[in-house]
Image: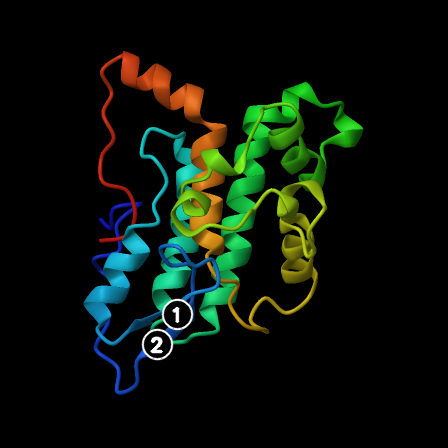
Amino acid sequence: MIPMFGHSHITLTDRDEPVLLPWPTDGNAGGFIEFSKASDWRAFVASLGIDSRIPESVRAKFARAQTLYLLGWVDFSAVKASELAALIALELALMDRYGGQLSKNKRSFAALLNYMVDVDGLTDAQIPMVVRCGGTALGQLTGETHPTLAERRNSLAHGDPFDGLPTGGLLELVRDLINFAYRHYIAEAASLGIQPTQAGPT
């Protein structure tokens, strides 16, 4: 049986040409990273896993996004499908954590993202990717920056999810937002002695 969150069954081989990926790097929110070895790509995708103490329903959806990103090594168009899967996982997480605080007719993805900032107090200083790379991410949640995460989700869902260039750092940002939304849940699990296990594809 294949482990739900493991990807060791997916075989990748080295490419003739490296993959150049737009992705925030230390101190540079507009950076690029290059991968020439399949093993490096696999390790990179594995590093994007959300906390293993988060409920399985959310982890399973985010793991699907990681699977698609991993397959981007073979077919780069899969990266865009991965972004849609990641945003779907984020919406599920926010609905789980905040949905009960909003009236049923106001539980849009955009409203949930805005709730993270306006009510739950999210700041750039609480987003590890922003701390690491600089810049800001809050505008993509509040609507001050376009496209917002909700607009990206809608564009991918209602257009062709395989078209377009990758959005640099999207999976890392989604990972950080999901971990933030569940931070109290994670802390409670830690207080019960539940330690994180390795998350993501291996």
Left or right of 30? Residue 152 is right
Q: How many marks do you count on the picture?
A: 2
* Crowd class of label 1 (few under 14; some 14 to 19; many from 20; radius 10 Å): some
The x and y percentages for residue 42 are 26, 61
Residue 147 visible somewhere in the drawing: yes
> What kind of residue is marked 2?
Val
In front here: 169 or 105?
169
- Spatial CA span between label 1 and label 2: 10 Å
Q: Residue at x 63, y 48 (%)?
A: 140
Q: Nearer the viewer, residue 158 or 136?
A: 136
Q: Residue at x 60, y 42 (%)?
A: 138
Whether residue 200 is situated above or below residue 122 in the rendered picture: below
Judging from the image, the colouring scheme is: rainbow
Q: Residue at x 48, y 73 (%)?
A: 77
The image shows residue 104 at horizontal and vertical percentages of 75, 26
> Is residue 32 left or right of 152 when viewed as pictured?
left
Mark 1 vs mark 2: which is more N-terminal?
2
On screen, 189 above or below 27? above
Q: Of the residues shown, which amino acid type is indicated by label 1?
A: Gly
Q: Secondary structure at mark 1?
A: loop
Q: Position of residue 93 (x, y in %)?
A: 52, 34
The circle on residue 72 is: 1
Residue under label 2, please give it.
19
The quadrant where residue 159 appears: bottom right
Is residue 10 something that shows in the picture? no
Disc 2: CA contacts within 10 A as few (<14), some (14-19) or many (>=20): some
